[in-house]
Image (cartoon, coloured by chain):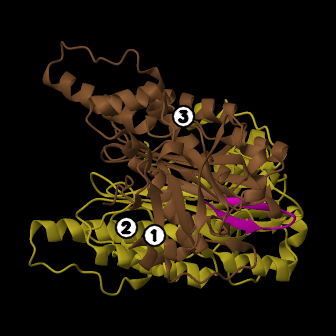
Chain colours: A yellow, B brown
Amino acid sequence: MIERLTNKIKLKNSSTVKGVGDDAAVLDFSNKQIVITTDLLTEGVHFNLMYTPLKHLGYKSIVVNLSDVVAMNATPKQVTVSLAISSKFSVEAIEELYEGIYLACEKYDVDLIGGDTTSSLTGLTISVTAIGEANKEDLAYRSGAKKTDLICITGDLGGAYMGLQLLERENEVFKGNNLIKPQLSGHDYILARQLKPEARLDIIAIFKELKIKPTAMIDISDGLSSEIKHICKESHSGAKIYEDKILLDNDTKNMALEFNINPLVTALNGGEDYELLFTIPVTDYEKVRNHPDITVIGHIADESEGTVLVTNAGSEIELTAQGWNPLK
Amino acid sequence: MIERLTNKIKLKNSSTVKGVGDDAAVLDFSNKQIVITTDLLTEGVHFNLMYTPLKHLGYKSIVVNLSDVVAMNATPKQVTVSLAISSKFSVEAIEELYEGIYLACEKYDVDLIGGDTTSSLTGLTISVTAIGEANKEDLAYRSGAKKTDLICITGDLGGAYMGLQLLERENEVFKGNNLIKPQLSGHDYILARQLKPEARLDIIAIFKELKIKPTAMIDISDGLSSEIKHICKESHSGAKIYEDKILLDNDTKNMALEFNINPLVTALNGGEDYELLFTIPVTDYEKVRNHPDITVIGHIADESEGTVLVTNAGSEIELTAQGWNPLK
């Protein structure tokens, strides 16, 4: 439906380089290009305050937007934050939320430059807009992947999803019996992945250092399958990724097994990892081969070849976008 | 509280010219400066869908943001729109909302460049960010008013407030008895002021034509008293405005009398007119004296003189900010 609604848009201003359709919009007011992106988080849909500390929520609401800026190969510079708050929130609660917001701004060197705080009849809504800058030639769109390009990811995937499953499970148990303490210890990694994700701003510096310009890039907020399909669609290409290249953190893997979930599925269809998925020319292979933060997981193929996962057994499975989508 | 929360902000980037504290933030990425502003509208607080057509709501949600851009003496160029929608809204309803959004974009020549559509547990929330551009030397902050500057307004005030009163009254009557049709005819002007306000982008062109650079400017969203006090606070000045200079539309005046409201109060404390309040050097008086869209209502004074209304009887009344504030 969003596509149908945005199809009607006709860009009018020469300063609008890229509107709807990528991680962030690009504006050109002169020699630097500006990227701007926005996200709306609503209570009960995007977060559950039963187990989400407000400070973490504030932090995360900034980070998810910075991640979109970074996914353009741009550097975030400013954010605006708007809050709609129901009367159930105390001043202290709102301050706690802002503490997290400020902490993220501090960590990523971005300025909070505006916003709006208003009341709502029920619940909490957070709207963040992030603005970043980049040299025109550095910007990485979803549309630039070329056949034979290597497909790379940063970090590991699935952790945020398993952190969410764990929190949801323990919350259900707690709701059933208040005396039972949540069993969360030993799972710091996946809990942090869910509650306090980070944007991979460090990768932008690594690209500069390695003299890499990604041909296409997207952040992994909805699961790897969904994001690869976005790149393939915009780049009019296919892709092959390899099961044995997708590394999982041990805690993620064990928790998935405990939940009877195929660990690979947490990477493919879990969301909110905020790692980067990007493509580079095959000639750049040596630059990334041994980099601890970057893993080559496959390559771009002809559109006719589809977007497939090559399993360890050698069979090819068409990827489907089953990422987390609050409108589904 | 917002002030307390934003006091902590330290701006870090040289591209951030102006952060929190004006109608819009200003970023300098090169020879043009960028202004960006954002607003969050929540159902039941900012709008009542019992009497607000969704198309009008979409239109208004854009306009109120463009008005903030214009109030910087800048030209709006782009908007982002995020919606959180509960399941009670049909696809048709959302399309109607977008129709209004597109109509405003069309009318004001701005590009919708991004956003987010997500679900909410209850009600509708609309978050809009608007971006505009201006030459650095043209920007009008709240802080530039100088003693003896003339205080001017565009258009007439109080209409939106009386439109709201009328809609609220007829809605109450209708809720009491569904067979009674709302009595709205003959009040097109104040209804349009409330339901379909316009941003005074035309004034930006008039300033250029008249070779006027406002020393300070703000849009009148919360009532004249409140806005004058903002300018005085930021400009470290006082102000005198004159009762007999504040012209009201006849429909506004008559409706106020019908409601037993002092018509002047609709201008001073009513909100949502989205006219402009600005100051100009007294030497520019001849340029605006006979302009049909601009009225001189007073002048800037020394801070020690306070912010006062001079009544027709000659007495001085200190203005108080009783503008509409959803956090009150």
The structure residue drawn at horizontal position 40% and vertical position 16%, both measured from the top left corner, is B186
**Which residue carries the number 3 mark?**
B59
In the displayed structure, A266 sits above or below B235; it is: above
In the image, is A203 to the left or to the right of A146?
Answer: left
Magenta residue span:
B22-35
Q: Chain of mark 1?
A: A
Q: Residue furthest toward the bottom?
A: A186
Q: Amino acid at mark 2?
A: Leu
Q: Are marks 1 and 2 on the same chain?
A: yes
**Which residue carries the number 2 mark?**
A164
**Which residue carries the number 1 mark?**
A160
Real-space Cα distance between discs 1 and 2? 6 Å
Q: Secondary structure at mark 1?
A: helix
In the image, is A25 to the left or to the right of A184?
Answer: right
For the residues bearing labels 1 and 2, Cβ distance under 8 angstroms = yes
- Let me know if residue A94 appears in the view: yes
